[in-house]
């Protein structure tokens, strides 16, 4: 095997967490709720470019993550705690990155338009924090197990 | 090509050659994978489906129909054709001297440059820029020869791209997994960005297509492109996992 980053037992979980969170954002918020759109008219060109790269990376992270997960399943039965820890850290980390950097710092797009954003932003980032906390809890559990 | 006999004949020819060679391999006692044969046949059927007159022409959604063709011929079909390993089959089947000459040709400098995935990427996206951002697309609507030449261009460019990334055939270029992954990422991102720009700016310009038609086509390009690229990604990771890719070139030895 010669995957990049294959050394860590956390990698498949992190990749899947990031990929899944990004996919959830795209599927639920872009397509089902249509709060922000395929193209929302406010997205600047740089947002369009970064979105394209992000979307491509998300798909590759999902595919790569699943293959690394298969690799792990090969060695032991069941999904190791480290993978779950990586999954929640990846998902929470991505959500927080999206909520703070993409929405607030770069202002690429907002969660929803024509409403008071504060409750949405709080809910978004609180979800991120909750996922990260679960990740940290599992990380400590996994470390103790070593 | 309003006569269905033309695409059928065009697709039957390579399929017949492939089937004859594969049957010959089995007859002389050498293994030829049914998966490879199936994949190649699938690729040919996809091309046939795309070229079939009833799918190729649509009065109200002409641009969407064009985009469906573009996706099938330029992205999905080439992947299936490449996985059919036609070059390996040819090298095994032709006489030894000719096979050796073919391998030498494959490793010649012009082919090394031509078959590099980055070159194929440039053909693909260069071709797309020229087609959709210049009057070329408008011209191709009235000129059937140009129209079919464009399809052929995208089929070949797509084939070279898939060959360089996931091809089981011996190729002139062997890139590391990371490099191939990076090139795929670049292609996926460019494809997505280009289709969004198409959705916003409604190019190709000066066409009889309605705005809604172009928007539908652009969305088709975005989501359809994703599917074809995810398939490439799955193949790329699968091959990396199984080390099946690019075994040393075997000269077409015939015992």
Image (cartoon, grey):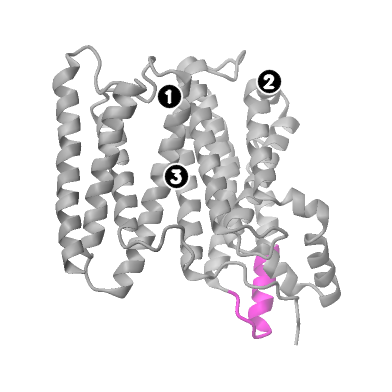
Q: Is residue B28 magenta?
A: yes
Separation (CA) of disc 3 from disc 2 = 27 Å
Residue at point 18%, 13% (across, down): A115
Name the magenta segment's main secondary structure: helix
Position of residue B196 in the picture relative to residue B132 (left or right): left
Position of residue B98 in the picture relative to residue B236 (left or right): right
Q: Report the front residue among A136 and B245.
A: A136
Residue at point 69%, 42% (across, down): B152
Residue B47 in the image: above or below residue B105: above
Residue B8 seen in render? no
Image mark 2: chain: B
Separation (CA) of disc 1 from disc 3 = 23 Å
**Quadrant of the drawing holding the C terminus of chain B:** bottom right
**Quadrant of the drawing holding the N terminus of chain B:** top right
> For mark 1, what is the residue?
A47
Q: Report the front residue among B221 and A30.
A: A30
Residue A107 lies, in percent from the top left, at 34, 20
Residue B211 is labelled as: none
Residue B253 lies, in percent from the top left, at 76, 81
Q: Is residue A96 magenta?
A: no
Residue B147 seen in render? yes
> For mark 3, what is the residue?
B227
Residue B134 is labelled as: 2
Separation (CA) of disc 1 from disc 2 = 25 Å
Q: Are marks 1 and 3 on the same chain?
A: no
Residue A47 in the image: above or below residue B75: above
Q: Are marks 3 and 2 on the same chain?
A: yes
Badge nearest the viewer, 1 or 2: 1
Residue A98 lies, in percent from the top left, at 30, 32
Mark 2 nearby-residue class (10 Å; few <14, some 14–19, many ≥20) = some
In the image, the segment drawn in magenta is B17-32
Mark 3 nearby-residue class (10 Å; few <14, some 14–19, many ≥20) = some
């Amino acid at each position: 095997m010669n995957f990049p980053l294959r050394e860590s037992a956390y990698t498949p979980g992190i990749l899947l967490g990031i990929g899944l969170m990004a996919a959830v954002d795209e599927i639920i918020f872009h397509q089902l709720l249509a709060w922000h759109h395929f193209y929302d008219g406010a997205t600047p060109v740089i947002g369009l470019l970064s979105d394209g790269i992000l979307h491509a990376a998300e798909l590759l992270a999902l595919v790569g993550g699943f293959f690394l997960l298969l690799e792990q399943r090969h060695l032991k039965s069941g999904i190791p705690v480290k993978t779950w820890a990586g999954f929640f850290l990846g998902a929470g980390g991505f959500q927080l990155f999206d909520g703070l950097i993409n929405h607030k710092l770069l202002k690429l797009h907002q969660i929803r338009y024509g409403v008071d954003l504060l409750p949405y932003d709080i809910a978004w980032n609180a979800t991120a924090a909750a996922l990260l906390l679960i990740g940290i809890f599992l990380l400590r559990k996994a470390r103790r197990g070593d | 090509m309003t006569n269905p006999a033309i695409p059928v004949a065009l697709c039957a020819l390579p399929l017949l050659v492939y089937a004859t060679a594969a049957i010959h391999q089995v007859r002389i006692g050498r293994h030829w994978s049914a998966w490879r044969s199936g994949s190649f046949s699938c690729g040919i059927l996809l091309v046939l489906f795309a070229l079939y007159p009833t799918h190729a022409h649509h009065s109200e959604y002409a641009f969407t129909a064009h985009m469906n063709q573009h996706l099938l011929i330029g992205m999905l079909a080439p992947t299936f054709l490449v996985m059919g390993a036609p070059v390996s089959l040819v090298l095994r089947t032709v006489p030894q001297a000719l096979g050796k000459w073919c391998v030498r040709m494959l490793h010649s400098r012009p082919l090394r440059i031509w078959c590099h995935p980055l070159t194929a990427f440039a053909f693909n996206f260069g071709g797309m820029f020229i087609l959709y951002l210049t009057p070329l697309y408008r011209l191709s609507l009235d000129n059937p020869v140009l129209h079919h030449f464009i399809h052929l261009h995208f089929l070949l460019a797509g084939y070279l791209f898939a060959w360089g990334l996931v091809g089981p055939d011996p190729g002139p270029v062997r890139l590391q997994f990371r490099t191939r992954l990076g090139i795929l990422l670049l292609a996926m991102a460019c494809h997505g960005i280009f289709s969004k720009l198409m959705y916003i700016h409604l190019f190709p310009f000066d066409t009889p297509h309605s705005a809604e038609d172009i928007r539908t086509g652009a969305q088709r390009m975005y989501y359809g492109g994703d599917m074809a690229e995810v398939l490439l990604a799955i193949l790329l990771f699968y091959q990396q996992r199984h080390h099946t890719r690019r075994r040393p070139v075997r000269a077409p030895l015939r015992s």
